[in-house]
Amino acid sequence: MKQIFLSISLLAALTASAQQLPATYPQLVKDITPKLVEWRRHFHQNPELSNREFKTGAFIADYLKSIGLDVKTNVAKTGVVAILKGGKPGPVVALRADIDALPVTERTPIPFASKVTTSFNGQQVGVMHACGHDSHTSILMGTATVLKKMQAEVPGTIVFLFQPAEEGAPDNEEGGAALMVKEGVLDNPKVEAVFGLHINSTVPAGQIQYKSGSFMASSDWFRIKVKGKGAHGSKPWQGVDPIATSSLIIEGLQHIVSRQSELTKAPVVISVGSIHSGVRNNIIPEDCEMLGTIRTLDSKMQQEVHERIRNTVQHIAAANGATAEVMIDTKTLVTYNDPELVKKTLPFLETAAGKGNVVERDWDTGAEDFSFYGAKVPAFFFYLGGMPKGQDPLKAAPHHTPDFYIDESGFDLGVKAFCQLVFDYAKSKK
Ligand code: NI
């Protein structure tokens, strides 16, 4: 009896070992860890704006070619896609990093702070990796290196997506994940699951945070143009005041949130971030323009909010004798983590991070164009800790700000998480 038991467990161990991470794996991760920091600092000192990541793309492509991967360049303009065919049978899995920086002037005291400037929308601006995409790029390069070194043991095919323009392409340009998908990065070979991570300046290094189902918000940008009729400021009844009408519209937009949206289902945010009209105290201008953003965590509610904004704006304008135009441009969809995929792969992340270091979190009204991959194939996007351990998250500088700071000690967990997902996901398919 005992003997049978032993041979069954031996058999189980042998079967499992077919796709177990090889014994060399811990040392490979250790070896690559200093490179993660070195690459990240290189990208940090050489940041490039969305759709302008020429040197970044070339650096990534040159490196991946040098380690023998099958590399495609100029994908979605400056992006890079690399493919690794493992020595063992298994599924096609995509891993994604975004590579672009932001028009932010860095203010951190770190020795490798960015000094780069460029022109953006006609203004001279600083350029900074103020969202941490530099760390995503180096983590994915590190993952590619480790997997390449274990190629004979790797199950299935890994598609590495180095994606430009996550922060949004410049006006009148296509870009980002939507363009990657349009160019077929998930089609050939046919990807069956895609994973991505985002470093987070308020999550302690060594931790992973996730949410199943809707995780990050859809983002729409809107422009509302209110047309009134000019008049002397002393005699408003002779005109139609577009500023007073716009103030009612702003009120009306908040009523869509507080009175018309089913907030127990999912949150909705509407923010007006810019309003422009008029030149002088005593002139009622002819028009007023507002710019803003809409965030939702349910794609049906996203469509409902669009309709309600159009309805509210048209009727408030009409009630005041004005006319109005509403333009809504969808930038990202809801980032949806496939619940089945999350359930299946969560234990793999726990193996990588250690028990207690994978933590469920609330939804996030921030947005991610990773959502475009998730709209096509089952996807899982999670946060990777980038905050010094012990720091108060409320004191950590937010993403997209000049003081944004990332602790580099959690980068190796990014590599471990990706490698573990590759091996264990394949194993779970058996
Ligand atoms: Ni980002």
Image (cartoon, rainbow, N blue to C red):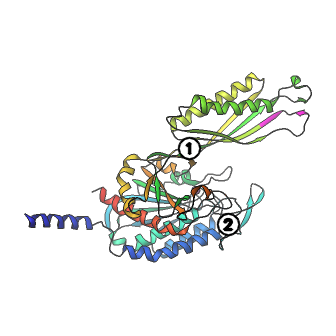
Q: Can residue 423 be found in the magenta stretch?
A: no
* Foreground residue among 222 and 31: 31
Q: Quadrant of ligand 1?
A: bottom right
Residue 30 at x, y percent in the picture: 44, 75
Q: Give SS at disc 2.
A: loop
Specify the quadrant of the image occupied by residue 115.
Answer: bottom right
Of callouts 2 and 1, which one flags the residue occurring earlier in the amino acid sequence?
A: 2
Nearer to me, 247 or 149: 247
Q: Is residue 396 above or below residue 239?
A: below
Q: What's the residue type where badge 1 is placed?
A: Ser
Q: Residue 69, can we see it?
A: no
Say if 155 sits above or below 336 in the image: below
Of tags 2 and 1, the one toward the viewer is: 2
| Disc number for residue 108 | 2
Chief secondary structure of the magenta span? loop
> In the image, residue 348 lies at what x, y percent?
36, 59
Q: Which mark is residue 218?
A: 1
Label 1: element kind: strand
Spot the residue most to the left. 1
Residues rendered magenta in the picture? 279-288
Q: Say if residue 308 shows up in the picture.
A: yes
Q: CA distance from mark 2 to mark 1?
A: 30 Å
